[in-house]
Image (tube, rainbow, N blue to C red):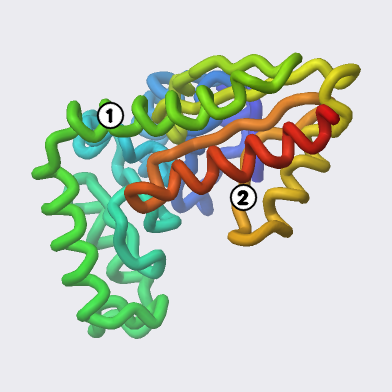
Amino acid sequence: MEIETREELEAVISKNTAILWYLNANTFVGQISPEDFVAVGKKYNVPTMNDCAADVPPWRTCGSTPRWALIWYASRGQGHQRSAECRPAAGPERPHCRCHLNAPPRANIGRGMKVNKEEILGMLVALELYLAKDHAQEWKVWEERIAHIGNATKPIGGVTTQVDVPKVANHTPTLMVTWDTEKVRISGDALKEAMRRGSPSIKLAGGGPGSVNVTVWMPDPGQERIVATRLQEELARAAT
């Protein structure tokens, strides 16, 4: 059941309510703050869970707040560069015990989601390696990658770029590429499709009348050069 306000949340809580789920990426979208959400959970003695699946990086998100009964991190695997079948959870012991009691069959670690023990240990190692990184240096590398891609589009008339960092969810440097559709005759969605169908296939974000977004925190070193070349090719083709 989805709610929008604190009043709606309190109105739907009953003796059958097992947990209150909050999507961190929508912190600035809804009308209830994280603090109010947790307060309602405590008021009715219902555990609260914050889904932070897209909130690592930054590394400081890990264990940054004890307010929630449970916090889920990096569900898709890219933030910790690990298996997508596992995700780490943080929180007090009691909510974890509740999760364990509801994972069939209860005696076997990971069995509920068919996650094997090797993947669980792999997740732990990936998390330890991630936290031990030089995160300031990693951020600098991302900025250099963004700059390389942005510079590749500068020779094309009508194209402008801007670097943005989302407040929450995928909090990394993001290149916003926009263009004058009178000079570059292609839509953002059409450009995304051309990049996806090209060789190699490249997935861009965003999309609209004349814009796309590019993130660089998941590619391997050097792949930003491939992205830059392909993006320049497609934009230049549309500008002729």
Percent from the top left, x then y, of residue 56?
Answer: 33, 40
10 in relation to 120, above or below? above
Q: Residue at x 20, y 37 (%)?
A: 63
| Disc marking residue 6 | none
Instruction: Please give the name of the residue rendered at 69% of the width and 49% of the height, measured from the top-left corner.
Output: 195
Q: Is residue 95 above or below residue 137?
A: below
Amino acid on which the number 1 mark rests in the picture: Trp
Locate residue 21 relative to residue 212 in the image: left or right.
Answer: left
Q: Locate residue 173: give its quadrant.
A: top left
The N terminus, quarter of image: top right
Vertical relation: 175 (above or below) 138: above
Residue wearing tag 2: 203
Q: Residue at left 55%, top 35%?
A: 214
Q: Secondary structure at mark 1?
A: helix
Residue where numbered disc 1 is placed: 139
Identify which amino acid the numbered label 2 is placed on. Lys
Residue 45, horizontal then vertical, whole percent: 36, 39
The x, y position of residue 206, in whole percent, is 67, 34
Helix or strand or loop: what does disc 2 sit on? loop
Is residue 155 found left or right of 17 in the rendered image?
A: right
Q: Estimate how packed mark 1 is, as few (under 14), some (14 to 19) or many (20 or more) residues with alpha carbons within 10 Å.
A: some
Say which of 222 and 44 sits in front: 222
Q: Bin the neighbour count of mark 2 within 10 Å (Cα to Cα): few under 14, some 14-19, many 20 and up.
A: some
Which of these two is toward me, 114 or 227? 227
Left or right: 100 with respect to 188?
left
What is the distance, in whole Å, between disc 1 and disc 2 at their CAs?
21 Å
Q: Is residue 30 visible?
A: no
Q: Earlier in the sequence, mark 1 or mark 2?
A: 1
